[in-house]
Amino acid sequence: MPKPDPDSPPRHPIPAVGVVCLRAPDEVLLIRRGKPPGAGGWSLPGGRLEWGERLHDAALRELSEETGVRAEMLGLIDVVDGRFEPDPDGRPMHHYVLVDYAVRWVAGEPQAGDDAAAACFVALADLPRLGLWDETVRIIDQAVARWPQAAGRNPTG
């Protein structure tokens, strides 16, 4: 039986978490990815689920590891099919299933850690200029709509 190539990507979906960390007034925490997939682009903090770890615990752990920020859990936003970056033959190199959570910032100023190249709070109004993935924008919008007070918005208008 041939041994698997350690440099080839796994050929099964990988469960991962993403975190929309909201801070008043009207800010969301983003990271610049330091490694593939998506190296160099802006994204939500997050990463792979570890063996035996609960999803919401993974979300808070990844947030802390990548940004140094502490937050309280607000709740589940959505489950999203991750990006499928093709290899030279057109097959997906990565297949992530992303479980996205909303959290409210509690303490700490963002500092890039783990596999993040940068971390900072960004005004919601500035998101369009960052070239975020459409699904990331949708997830942030859903979090702000569901928990407007966490982003410093008045839910009654």
Image (cartoon, rainbow, N blue to C red):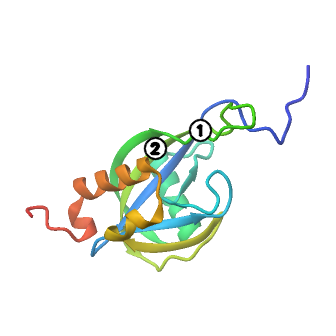
Q: Position of residue 109 (x, y in %)?
A: 47, 80
Residue 3 as seen in the image, left or right of residue 112: right
Q: Is residue 1 above or below residue 52?
A: above
In this rendering, position of residue 32 left or right of residue 2: left
- Which residue is rendered at x = 74% and y = 38% of the image? 9
For the point 46% across and 78% down, which residue is it?
A: 108
Q: Quadrant of the C terminus?
A: bottom left
The correct choice, above or below, for 11 with respect to 37 in the image is: above
Q: Mark 1 or mark 2, which is nearer the start of the sequence?
A: 1
Q: Residue at x 45, y 40 (%)?
A: 80
Tag 2–tag 1 contact (CB < 8 Å): no
- Residue 126 in view here: yes
Counting other residues with Cα less than 10 Å from the Cα at mark 2, is it few (<14), some (14-19), or many (20 or more)? many
- The quadrant of the image that shows the N terminus is top right
Q: How many marks?
A: 2
Question: Residue 94: which quarter of the image?
Answer: top right
Cα distance between the residues tagged 2 and 1: 16 Å
In this figure, which residue is indicated by the disc labeled 1?
A: 84
Closer to us: 137 or 61: 137
Amino acid type of the residue tagged 1 in the rendering: Phe
Residue 131 picture location, percent across and down? 47, 60
Check disc 1 and report its element: helix, strand or loop: loop
Q: Nearer the viewer, mark 2 or mark 1?
A: 1
Q: Position of residue 102 (x, y in %)?
A: 36, 56
Badge 1 local density, few (<14 within 10 Å), some, or many (20+)? some
